[in-house]
Amino acid sequence: MTDRIVSGMRPTGKLHFGHYLGVIQNWVELQHKYESFFFVADWHALTTKYDKTETLRKDVIDVVIDWLSCGINPEISTIYVQSLIPEIAELNVYLGMITPQNWVERDPCLKDMAKILRSKDGAASQINYGLMGYPVLMSADIMMFNSNYVPVGIDQVAHIEITRDIARRFNNIYKTDFFAEPKPLLNNCSLICGLDGNKMGKSFHNDIKISDTEEVTAKRVMTAITDRSRMRKDDPGHPDECEVAFKYWQIFGDKDKVQKIRCECEKGLRGCADCKRELGKTINEYFAPIREKRAYYEAHPKEVEDIIQSGSAKARTEAQRIIKEVRHIIGMY
Ligand code: TRP
Ligand code: SF4
């Protein structure tokens, strides 16, 4: 039997290059090797944005459109929306019963989220019960499909550790070996930084979206940080200290090109503005096929809706099979 993977993303709206290079590209490869379940975690979005739901529906659709455009294939992967699988909520209840409170309290991911929340809203912000349950709900996502592996970024590993603990505890309490202890599948791609050199993120306004136009992309690339010590365009540059632009070249350019740029930069034969203009073009070429597909799906919303509905129906059938077994194992009526 092929191993299974489950992974999800919160519906943050249109995705940026960081999502593509850090997560989606990995999924696109993995889908050929594993039976794959990819979902939009709209309940997880509510843990912090329960009062900002005006764009939630659109954000879910945008995420799915980005996935499809990047090459997640609905013929081989199951794409679904978390809240369309009520069995996940039921499993969340069972897992909540067997999870000691201090397991969630010491979850470092949750601690970080709480810190960010407090820094935004000050002391007024309370951590709601749902947010405390974030790691349990995430365990329910993964265990709902009895997944063996979970492809995630390094920042999510602590969550997967809790899932393993919960799965083991379930098996111990109910004297079963029903649940696998899922392992994280870390990808080896390097993280792309934002245009200002910090971590790329929507809220930092240092990102480029997969859905941005070529003009916007080109303009955004011109703002990328370069070698700060360089004053004039014929000064010798230091590609390794070129904080963002050269790093992008290493991601999007081929080897020979990168070598050529390094040489020209070091000899002072290449100005940063020209360099970034060319980089913008290269990035636009890289994303052209993805953006073409994106335009197609934008123009065919019915097709996207069908993919979401049929993927969710398929996921639900499997979830119903599993929850039935879980109810039996626990001894529910
Ligand atoms: N917490 C993940 C994130 O913020 C999203 C997520 C929710 C997830 N449930 C999951 C990822 C289950 C993997 C498996 O990115
Ligand atoms: Fe960076 Fe290119 Fe400027 Fe060199 S020429 S510092 S590689 S942007």
Image (cartoon, rainbow, N blue to C red):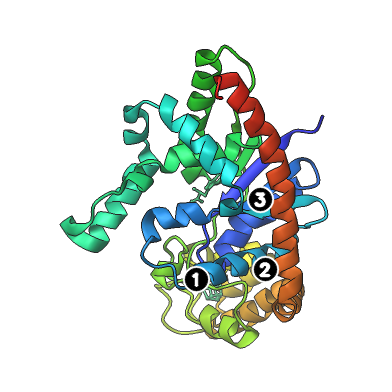
**Side (left or right) of 18 relative to 112:** right
User: Whole-Å distance between the Cαs marked 1 and 3?
Assistant: 23 Å
Q: Is residue 127 above or below residue 207?
A: above
Which percent across, then down, holds residue 110? 36, 43
**Which of the marked residues, 3 or 2, is nearer the chain's N terminus?**
3
Which percent across, then down, holds residue 299? 73, 81
Which one is in front, 119 or 241?
A: 119
| Few, some or many residues within 10 Å of mark 2 (<14, 14–19, 20+) | many
* Residue at the disc numbered 2: 65
Task: Report the quarter where the C terminus lies.
Answer: top right
Q: Residue at x 67, y 81 (%)?
A: 281
Q: Residue at x 74, y 62 (%)?
A: 307
Which one is in front, 312 or 285?
A: 312
For the residue marked with disc 3, what is the amino acid?
Answer: Phe
Q: Residue at x 51, y 74 (%)?
A: 236
For the residue marked with disc 1, what is the amino acid?
Answer: Asp
Q: Could one spot residue 96 in this view of the protein?
A: yes
* Residue at the disc numbered 1: 207
| Few, some or many residues within 10 Å of mark 1 (<14, 14–19, 20+) | many
**Side (left or right) of 162 relative to 131:** right
Q: Residue at x 49, y 53 (%)?
A: 43
* Residue at the disc numbered 3: 38
Q: Where is residue 216, by image quadrant?
A: bottom right
| Few, some or many residues within 10 Å of mark 3 (<14, 14–19, 20+) | many
Q: Is residue 207 above or below residue 28?
A: below
- Mark in front: 2 vs 1: 2
Q: Where is residue 287, by image quadrant?
A: bottom right
